[in-house]
Image: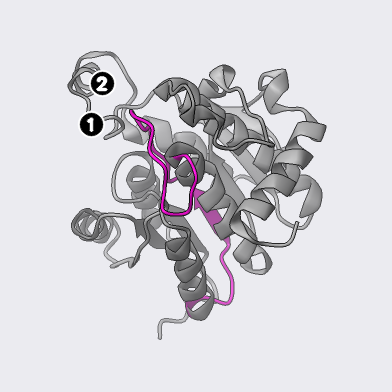
Amino acid sequence: MEDLTERRIVVVTGASSGIGLAAAVDLARRGDHVVLVGRDPARLQIAGDRVREASGERPELFRADFAVLDDVRRLAEQLRAGYDRIDVLANNAGAIVLQPITTVDGFELSMQANHLAPFLLSTLLRDRIGRLVVTASDAHRSGILDPDDLNAALRRYRPFQAYGTSKQANILFTAEAARRWPEVPAYAFHPGVVRTRFGNESRVVALGMRLLPFRSPDKGAETLVWLANQDPSRLVTGGYYADRKAHRPRAKASDPALAARLWTASARAVGVPA
C-alpha cells in the first residue's frame, strides 16, 4: 500500500461532477490523496480519470447512493477499513428534487440525501475526521425546518423550499457538530449559484443552468478548497462562509436550540446515539 503518512487524506462526497469534482481536482493537484464518493458508477469512473489527468495519481473511488442509508453505512465501513484517519471530510453530495419522493428509508428525498445521509456518515466516521466541510447554500433562507417532522415537505411539496430546508439543516448541523465535537473543526459554506447537473430532469431548470450567468463549478469550489486548507486558528469553527469570508446565516439557521433539536431528531431517524 502507498505510504500516506505525510499526505492528507481528503474524502469528497458528490464528487462525480460539479463542485465536488472541481474541488477534488484542485486538492489532488495540491498534493492531497483524494477519495471520491459518487452515486453513478460510470460518472464516478470518468471523474476519477479527470483527477488522474490533473494530478498524475488515480484516486480511490467509492460508490454510494445517499437515498439509501444502508449504502451510507456500507460506505462508512469501507472508509474505516481503508483509512485510519480522514484529514478532511467534505460533505458535498446533494440534490434538488423536483417532485415529492419518499426514500426506501421513509424520508423525503432531499432531506435524506442532503442532510440525514451526511449526518450519518459524519457520525459513523467521527473518530477518524480531522476537519469537516459542509456544502450548504443561501437557499437556507427559504427553509422551514421542523425537527419534529422531517417529512413535512411531502404534504405540500415545493422543490426549492424543500431544498432550502435541507440546506438550513446543513448549517445547523455544522454549528452543532462544532459544539459537540470540539476536536473536529467544522465549517459550512455557500458556493454561490453554480452551473451543475442540479435539476437536469427538468427542461426549464436545465435550460436556465445553461443560459443564466451562474458560476462555474471551479469558482463554486474555491471556498470548499480554502476551508479545507486554511489554518483553523484563522477560522470560526461552526461558522458559515461564502467567498472565503465569514457570513451570518438567517436566524433560523443559527438558533442553537433548533440545532440541538435537529441533532436529536436526526440521530433518532438514522439510528445512532444522540
Q: Nearer the viewer, residue 262 or 29?
A: 262
Q: Pointers 1 and 2 in contact (CB under 8 A)?
A: yes
Instruction: Count neighbours of disc 1 (C-alpha within 10 A) and say few if under 14, some if 14 to 19, many if 20 or more.
Output: some
What amino acid is found at the position of numbered circle 1 in the picture? Asn
Across the whole image, how many numbered discs are drawn on residues?
A: 2
Residue assigned mark 1: 200
Residue assigned mark 2: 205
Alpha-carbon span between mark 1 and mark 2: 7 Å
Q: Height in image: 266 above or below 9?
A: above
Let me know if residue 84 appears in the view: yes
Which label is found at residue 13? none
Which residue appears at 26% of the width and 35% of the height?
197
Query: Quick one: quadrant of the C terminus?
Result: bottom right
Q: Secondary structure at mark 2?
A: helix
Per the rendered image, the range of residues in magenta is 82-108
Residue 66: give x, y in percent of width and height: 42, 53
